[in-house]
Image (cartoon, helix red, strand yellow):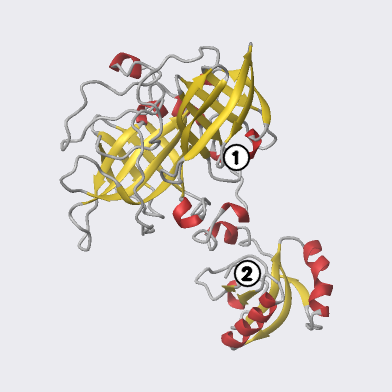
């Protein structure tokens, strides 16, 4: 079930460094491919990575009894290096020559194996789709992701799997130049700029490197952290005598503009940079030094590097099964009561929550070490070690639950479920 967002007109730009687009059967193809780092000619694209060959604009009609026949899902697939992303949305076809979303979100397509997206021969990738949107979730992930495959065909992209979240219809997304662009503020005309500044630069950071790419008079800033959604911004700049100024927008945040300005100095493979902008990563605030990097050395993120935690998800992901899975082998509870009346148990759990405890009602027949009769057992939190529970039990007793005790629940036998989690409500 798709999450409907507020209507936002997000204008995006077809001229992305590795972006490419071709027309569907409802739009005439362009006379030539948009300009990219490569020439865009067929023989060059055959030597490109799968990630770059997947780039482009696509649409797919939505079927269903309660769906307007003119409703379409849209995608604009982009990359940084061989990291794969997509602007996604829902739009209505009309008589215009554009498809602008009335709801949108951002997708990260992260592989288990980076070599799959780097491949110049493969046309198919198995990836995990992670979604976020500044409009719906304050930029945090909707959930821990959904695995599926993306296959490149002559007509477009075939998406298969991704069934648990269902943000996209199954089937083929056809090439469609009408789809709105990702970055509206890129300079569309190629301009000769300071040749020493051109290329990819990197600022090494403890959590993740921050990349800067300069292409002509266009800038891109990119950072992918293990525990949070990608930061990806791009826009056009005027560069003159060590100074620059321009406008950019951030991927996943719509077309909201941000003014960039600053100055720079290039000394060999060092870039000394100061840059200002409200939405820039904090690592780029003040004066920083970046090192020159080859395009092929941009790191491709894989799923084994993703480190989810409670701060990775917004309110749509708060009840994700991700954190329930960690308790399936059992947990230590600080048990305060057990009764046959579920409502009474939930009332006590709410009182514990109001006191600041991550309360939980356990339905005892679902757990190996709990009573096989039907009891609703209240605990002031779930702990993965006995030591953690022991650190907290005295505070629980002092709060008025003098008979509280520690016990391991054992493995989960059933997940129907009669349990109630109050900590995230």
Q: Quadrant of residue 299?
A: top right
Q: Give x and y (percent) for residue 166.
A: 36, 54
Q: Residue at x 16, y 38 (%)?
A: 26
Q: Nearer the viewer, residue 32 or 224?
A: 32
Q: What distance separates the C-alpha of mark 1 from that of mark 2?
A: 27 Å
Examine the image and state in which quarter residue 384 appears.
bottom right
- Can residue 189 be seen in this snapshot? yes
Q: In which quadrant of the rendered image does the C terminus lie?
A: bottom right
Reading the image, the residue beneath label 2 is 423
Examine the rendering and report whether any part of residue 371 can be seen.
no
Q: In the shown orientation, is residue 117 left or right of residue 314? A: left
The answer to whether 385 is drawn above or below residue 365 in the figure is: above
- Residue 225, label in figure: 1
Disc 2 element: loop
Up the image or down, 15 lies above or below 277; here it is above
Q: Camera-side residue: 246 or 24?
A: 246
Horizontal and vertical percent position of residue 383:
72, 64
Mark 1 neighbour class, 10 Å CA radius: few under 14, some 14 to 19, many 20 or more:
some
Q: Which residue is painted at 47% across and 35% down in the image? A: 248
**Residue 166 in the figure: left or right of residue 375:** left
Instruction: State which tag comes first along the sequence, 1 or 2.
Output: 1
In this picture, residue 240 sits left or right of residue 49: right
Residue 386 falls in image quadrant: bottom right
**Count of number-bearing discs:** 2
């Amino acid at each position: 079930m798709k999450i409907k967002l507020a209507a936002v007109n997000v204008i995006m730009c077809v001229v992305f460094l590795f972006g490419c687009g071709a027309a569907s059967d409802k739009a005439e193809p362009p006379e030539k491919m948009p300009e990219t780092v490569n020439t865009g000619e067929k023989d060059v694209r055959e030597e490109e990575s799968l990630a770059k060959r997947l780039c482009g604009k696509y649409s797919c009609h939505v079927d269903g009894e309660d769906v307007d026949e003119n409703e379409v899902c849209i995608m604009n697939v982009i990359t940084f290096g061989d990291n794969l992303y997509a602007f996604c949305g829902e739009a209505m076809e009309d008589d215009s020559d554009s498809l602008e979303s009335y709801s949108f979100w951002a997708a990260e397509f992260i592989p288990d194996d980076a070599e799959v997206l780097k491949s110049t021969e493969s046309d198919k990738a198995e990836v995990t789709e992670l979604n976020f949107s500044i409009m719906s979730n304050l930029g945090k992930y909707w959930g821990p992701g959904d695995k599926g495959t993306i296959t490149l065909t002559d007509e477009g992209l075939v998406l298969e799997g991704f069934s648990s979240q269902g943000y996209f219809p199954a089937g083929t997304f056809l090439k469609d130049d009408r789809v709105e662009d990702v970055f509206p503020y890129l300079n569309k005309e190629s301009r000769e700029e300071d040749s020493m500044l051109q290329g990819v630069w990197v600022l090494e950071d403890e959590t993740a490197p921050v990349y800067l790419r300069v292409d002509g008079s266009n800038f891109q800033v990119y950072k992918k952290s293990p525990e949070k959604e990608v930061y990806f911004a791009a826009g056009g700049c005027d560069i003159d005598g060590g100074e620059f100024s321009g406008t950019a927008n951030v991927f996943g945040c719509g077309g909201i503009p941000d003014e960039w300005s600053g100055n720079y100095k290039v000394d060999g493979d060092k870039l000394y940079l100061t840059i200002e902008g409200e939405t820039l990563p904090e690592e780029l605030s003040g004066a920083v030094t970046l090192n020159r990097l080859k395009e092929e050395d941009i790191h491709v993120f894989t799923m084994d590097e993703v480190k989810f935690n409670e701060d990775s998800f917004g309110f749509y992901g708060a009840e994700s099964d991700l954190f329930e899975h960690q308790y399936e082998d059992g947990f230590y509870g600080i048990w305060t009561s057990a009764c046959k009346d579920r409502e009474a148990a939930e009332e006590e759990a709410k009182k514990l929550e109001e006191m600041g405890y991550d309360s939980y009602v356990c339905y005892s027949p679902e757990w190996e070490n709990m009573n096989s009769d039907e009891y609703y057992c209240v605990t002031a939190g779930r702990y993965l070690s006995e030591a953690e529970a022991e650190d907290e039990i005295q505070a629980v007793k002092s709060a008025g639950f003098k008979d509280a005790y520690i016990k391991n629940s054992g493995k989960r036998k059933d997940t129907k479920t009669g349990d109630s989690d109050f900590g995230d409500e």
